[in-house]
Image (spheres, grey):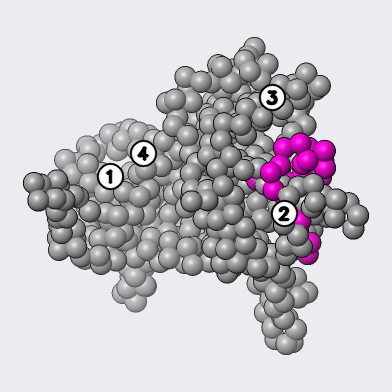
Amino acid sequence: MPVIDVKNVNVTYRVLMNNAGSLKELFRDAAKGKARVIEYIALQDISFTVEKGEVVAILGPNGAGKSTLLKVLAGVLPPTKGTSKVDGKIAPMIELGAGFHPEMTGAENVLFYSALMGRDVKRVKERTSAIGEWAGVSDHMDFPLRTFSSGMVARLAFATATDEQAEVLLVDEVLSVGDADFQEKSKGRMHELINSGAAVVLVSHDMRAVLELATKAVWLENGHIKMIGKPAEVVAAYEAH
Amino acid sequence: MPVIATPIGAVKIQLIPELVPSTLILRALIRYPLSIMKYAQLIRLLVGRELTLRYKRSVIGIGWTLLNPMLTSFVLWVVFSFAFGNRLIDGQQFAPYLMAGVLLNTFLNQGTWLAAESIAANSEILTKIYVRPELFTISAAISGFINFLIGLIPLAIVVYVSGQTLAWTLPLVLVVALCMTLFVAGLGLFLSTLFVRFDDTRNIVGVLLMIALYITPVFYPISILSPTMQTFINANPITSYLEIFRWSFSDNASPTLLDWVYMLSTSIIVFLIGSKVFKKYWPRTVAML
């Protein structure tokens, strides 16, 4: 049983030509017969599986549909056609710190962010000081987030997101958080999570990281899969392209 | 489906299909709240955030929730007490009459506004983490509910100052407030879908909410209107909510059974339609966030 099973996923956005952003414009365009709906295809016929312990890297140029694919896997964006099944708890490490608010304290933000990810609030409360300590911001946890430096915010977000073991990790270029010391530390934790048997989907432009971590690579181009296979072969073909 | 282990194996008890026909109304009353209750922890955090964040940088903080309806009521009282103050039925008092109207109208106005903005305002979260999107809208409606409950304290003071007492039917205010929460949540779910898609719906809703203040008997007694106008005002469901609220709080109105039926049915229907529309268009809505 694969942990992630993506079958014939299509995502199309309906875009109004002339981009009517208001009802008024829509009525005006419709009256003139100019309101045309075009379908923008973001993903086309994507199928692949990820087994437990597998690390799948998604490669491709900007606009190939990598972020859209991660959103589909995270369950945020329902596919227009096809199915995306994910079995188990997801740790979405896509732009960390979604929902962080500058006026709430560090501890409050940790709690809220964790609750958004579906974690048990009581258990997180007991973990809060440990999370703050790991992120190196223990002294600041009771101050509003606006008093944190941006590096501190990023560290706290990473520490919170990775605090609980998940069956599925969705990673979007988050391996470079904070200063050199913290990067080492976060890399270590990522390896820990990956080695613990989670299924990982990783979007990266860093080919060295891909070769080092991935067990499978998927090359996306214009919304469809151009190549899928062993990382070394896919990376070689992608770089030669 | 409950399963009981017996010596001859597992026997499925067919309780649910028989006792609970899956009609729409029962779904709204039982299944939906149950499915939302699973997220009680998150809802509590969302409501707390809604209530406190707005006042994080103010001196008296959440005290504004108390002060706001009092100030509005005072202004309206100064303006209208001369015109309408002695037009009420004997035994009714204008000050609590007016303030009850202001409180309920604030609930409708602010609650709907917050709920309708809740999806666009939280797009950052909704495009990154899977959370049931309705939770944001429902939490906004619940924070309107709590603000309303807080506002009952100054209203009680006004009731006593104007020589009335609280009625024994006071607990029924909770029913009105819950119906209002459903109504506001449903309206918010419907509008939030529109808000994401079309910017100018905000202006239209702003005007409609202003009209709502005038087509509800907030600051005038309904008896001063012509029979035709009375029919029109009575067709506004919020009029029923308000009549029941005034009556149950300090016996300051006389709602009929029809008002109760109207209140209960509109709250459920509006909520159902709102969530249906919201669900149906969610894939398109999230693509535009």
Depicted B112 relative to depicted B57: above or below: below
**Amino acid at dot 3:** Gly
Q: Secondary structure at mark 4?
A: helix
Residue B239 pos. (x, y %): 34, 61
Sequence-first tag of 1 and 4: 4
Image quarter in which the C terminus of chain B is found? bottom right
Q: Which residue is mark 3?
A: A188
Q: Which mark is residue B174?
A: 1
Residue B59 placement, left or right of A233: left
Q: Nearer the viewer, mark 4 or mark 3?
A: 3
Residue reaching furthest left?
A: B7
Q: Which residue is mark 4?
A: B149
**Amino acid at dot 2:** Gly
Q: Do the residues at discs 2 and 4 belong to one chain?
A: no
Q: Which residue is mark 2?
A: A229
**Amino acid at dot 4:** Leu
Q: Nearer the viewer, mark 3 or mark 2?
A: 2
Pointers 1 and 4 in contact (C-beta within 8 Å): no
The residue at the point 77 percent across, 41 percent down is A210
